[in-house]
Image (cartoon, helix red, strand yellow):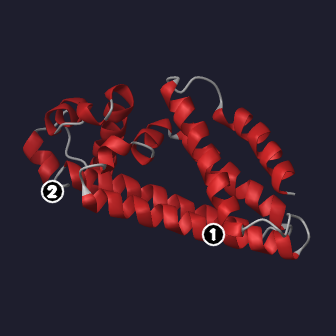
C-alpha cells in the first residue's frame, strides 16, 4: 500500500472506526479490526492515535467543530424561530450524511466507564443547552415563543426530542431520511412552545 500523508491516514482510521461502531457498537471497535479495515498494521494506527479513547475523542472533537460551524452560520438568520430551525436542521443534515457519528455521540455505553469521554460529551451538551436557551430567550423577547416557559427547560425538551429522534433512527438501522421526521417534529415543537 502506498504511504499516505498523515491527515489522509487519520481520516481513514476515523472513518473505519465510525463504520465499525455503526456495524456492531462500541464493542466492535478494536485496534485489530481498525487495522484490518484500513489495511495497515496495528502499530501504524498507534503512530496516529495513542488509543481507542484518543480516536473517540477525535470523533467528538470533529462533531463539536461541526456544531460550532452550524452555530456560527445560523447567527446571521434574523428571525429567531427560523434560526432555531436551521440549527436543528444543521444537526439532522449532519447525522443523515454521517450516521455512524450518531452511534458515537448518543451511545451511553461508550461514556459510562470513561470519565474523559464523558466530560467531553458533557461539555458538548452543556454548550448546546446554552446556545438553545439563548435562542429561546431571544424568541421570547421577540414574542415568538411563550414567555412563561423557562428557556432552559425548553432547551432540554428540544435537545431531548432531537436525541430521541436520532436514537430511534439509529436503532432502526438508520432506515429512512431522519430529516423528514425531524421537520415534522420541529413543527410540532415550535407550535408547543409558540
Q: What residue is shown at x 47% (from left), y 41% (from top)?
A: 102
Do tag 1 and tag 2 residues touch (Cβ < 8 Å)? no
CA separation in Å, label 1 and label 2: 33 Å
User: Quick one: quadrant of the C terminus?
Assistant: bottom right
Report the residue at 63% width, 69% height from top. 131
Sequence-first tag of 1 and 2: 2
Crowding around mark 2 (Cα neighbors within 10 Å: few <14, some 14 to 19, many 20+) is: few
Q: Residue at x 41, y 58 (%)?
A: 121
Specify whether 167 is left or right of 182. left
**x and y percentages locating residue 27 in the rendered image:** 24, 33
Q: Secondary structure at mark 2?
A: loop
| Numbered tag placed on residue 100 in the rendering | none
Residue extending furthest toward the front: 148
Where's residue 15, x and y in %? 36, 41
Classed neighbour count for the residue bearing mark 1: other residues with Cα under 10 Å, few (<14), some (14–19), many (≥20): some
| Numbered-mark total | 2
Question: Is any part of residue 61 visible from this angle?
Answer: no
Query: Can you tell which quarter of the image residue 12 is in?
Result: top left
Q: Which residue occupies the foreground of this view, 87 or 132?
A: 132
Label placed on residue 50: 2
The image position of residue 96, as x and y in percent, is: 58, 38
- 79 with respect to 73 (left or right): right
Residue that sits furthest to the right in the current view: 143
Q: Is residue 106 above or below residue 71?
A: above
State whether residue 152 appears in this view: yes
Question: Residue at the spot x=43%, y=67% of the render?
Answer: 123
Question: In this figure, which residue is indicated by the disc labeled 1?
Answer: 131
Question: In which quadrant of the rendered image does the N terminus lie?
Answer: top left
Amino acid at each position: 500500500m502506498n504511504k499516505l500523508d498523515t491527515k489522509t491516514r487519520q481520516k481513514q482510521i476515523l472513518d473505519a472506526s465510525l463504520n465499525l461502531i455503526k456495524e456492531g457498537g462500541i464493542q466492535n471497535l478494536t485496534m485489530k479490526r481498525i487495522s484490518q479495515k484500513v489495511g495497515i498494521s496495528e502499530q501504524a494506527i498507534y503512530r496516529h492515535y495513542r488509543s481507542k479513547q484518543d480516536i473517540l475523542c477525535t470523533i467528538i472533537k470533529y462533531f463539536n467543530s461541526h456544531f460550532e460551524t452550524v452555530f456560527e452560520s445560523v447567527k446571521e438568520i434574523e428571525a429567531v424561530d427560523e434560526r432555531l430551525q436551521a440549527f436543528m436542521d444543521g444537526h439532522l443534515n449532519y447525522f443523515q450524511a454521517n450516521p455512524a457519528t450518531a452511534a458515537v455521540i448518543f451511545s451511553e455505553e461508550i461514556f459510562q466507564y470513561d470519565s474523559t469521554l464523558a466530560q467531553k460529551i458533557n461539555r458538548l451538551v452543556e454548550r448546546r443547552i446554552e446556545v438553545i436557551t439563548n435562542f429561546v430567550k431571544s424568541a421570547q423577547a421577540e414574542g415568538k415563543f411563550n414567555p412563561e416557559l423557562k428557556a432552559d427547560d425548553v432547551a432540554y425538551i428540544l435537545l431531548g426530542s432531537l436525541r430521541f429522534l436520532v436514537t430511534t433512527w439509529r436503532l432502526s438501522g438508520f432506515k429512512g431520511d431522519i430529516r423528514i421526521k425531524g421537520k415534522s417534529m420541529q413543527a410540532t415543537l415550535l407550535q408547543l412552545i409558540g
